[in-house]
């Protein structure tokens, strides 16, 4: 193929044509966004009967077949949270659970499917606070998270201060996740959540970023409740939500 060489005059002409083309393109102001409005979300209504009927029929449907079905099942394994929450749990039982979490499929099946490189494993192992350290040690280096059920699970009848203290002890023991249960009384519902993240400076949050103010604090205020958010850089974040119950 022959390539036509352009001289200085041709290059200048091409440059002028490009400039002329740009001049024809309309210019628009920068889209600076709009304030967050959650009214349309709060006004959403769900046809519960239709949803339940559709959900009940899902078990008999097989829209995914053959290799795609296998792929979906493998993906489902990586989203699982293996749990042993028996009243007679022991360290040995937790160790066996952790071994299953690291190798959820039989070696022969993995080879037949040719998925050795995928390193299929579950997402997390959930244990009582007493066995957090055992699970952390057994799963070290596997990338599997350790979740702890704290706050006096399953009844949650211990005093609030003790439940919060148990959360802190589970985090100190190495738990990555904490399942927190709220407190429900005849008059109100209270939920306390604390993480061990990096925290942040609320005064440094840009004024156009109103997720915390609008999505949490204002929403509870409109419902007659309150929210307290305590955070600081390097100190994690504590959130307390309180909502009064409406009497029927």
Image (cartoon, rainbow, N blue to C red):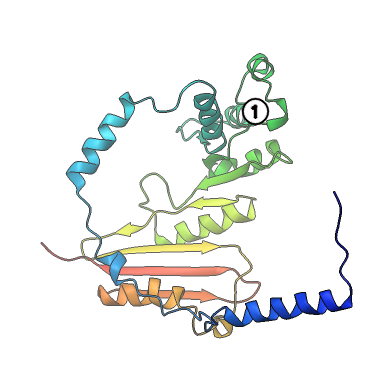
Q: What is the crowding at mark 1: few (fewer than 14 residues within 10 Å), some, or many (at least 20)? A: some
The vertical placement of 7 against 65, above or below, is below
Is residue 182 left or right of 120 when viewed as pictured?
left
* Place of residue 138 in the rendered image (x, y in percent of width and height, measured from the top left): 69, 36
- Quadrant where the C terminus lies? bottom left
Quarter of the view holding residue 78: top right
Secondary structure, mark 1, is helix
- Picture coordinates of residue 62 (x, y %)? 38, 24
Q: Residue at x 55, y 46 (%)?
A: 147
Q: Is residue 62 above or below residue 169?
A: above
Kindly identify which residue carries mark 1: 99
Closest to the observer, 89 or 178: 178
- Looking at the picture, tell me which residue is in the foreground, 127 or 111: 111
Query: Is 33 situated left or right of 197 in this image?
Result: left
Taking the spot 46% from the left edge, 69% from the top edge, the residue there is 239
Q: Position of residue 92 (x, y in %)?
A: 62, 27
213 left or right of 119? left
Residue sitting at x 70%, y 77% = 17
């Amino acid at each position: 193929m022959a390539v036509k060489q352009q001289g200085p005059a041709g290059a200048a002409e091409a440059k002028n044509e490009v400039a002329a083309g740009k001049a024809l393109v309309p210019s628009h102001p920068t889209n600076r966004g709009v304030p967050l409005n959650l009214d349309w979300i709060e006004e959403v209504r769900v046809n519960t009967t239709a949803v339940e009927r559709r959900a009940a029929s899902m078990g008999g449907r097989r829209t995914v077949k053959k290799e795609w079905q296998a792929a979906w099942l493998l993906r489902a394994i990586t989203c699982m949270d293996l749990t042993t929450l028996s009243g007679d749990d022991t360290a040995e039982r937790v160790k066996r659970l952790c071994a299953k979490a690291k190798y959820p499929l039989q070696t022969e099946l993995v080879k037949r499917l040719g998925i050795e490189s995928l390193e299929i494993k579950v997402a997390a192992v959930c244990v009582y606070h007493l066995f957090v350290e055992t699970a952390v040690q057994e799963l070290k280096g596997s990338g599997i998270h350790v979740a702890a059920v704290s706050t006096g699970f399953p009844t949650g009848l211990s005093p609030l201060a003790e439940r919060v203290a148990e959360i802190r002890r589970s985090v100190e023991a190495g738990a990555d996740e904490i399942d927190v249960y709220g407190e429900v009384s005849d008059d109100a519902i209270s939920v306390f959540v604390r993480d061990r993240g990096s925290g942040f400076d609320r005064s440094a949050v840009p004024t156009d970023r109103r997720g915390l103010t609008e999505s949490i604090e204002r929403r509870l205020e409109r419902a007659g409740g309150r929210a307290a958010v305590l955070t600081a850089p390097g100190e994690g974040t504590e959130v307390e939500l309180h909502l009064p119950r409406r009497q029927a």
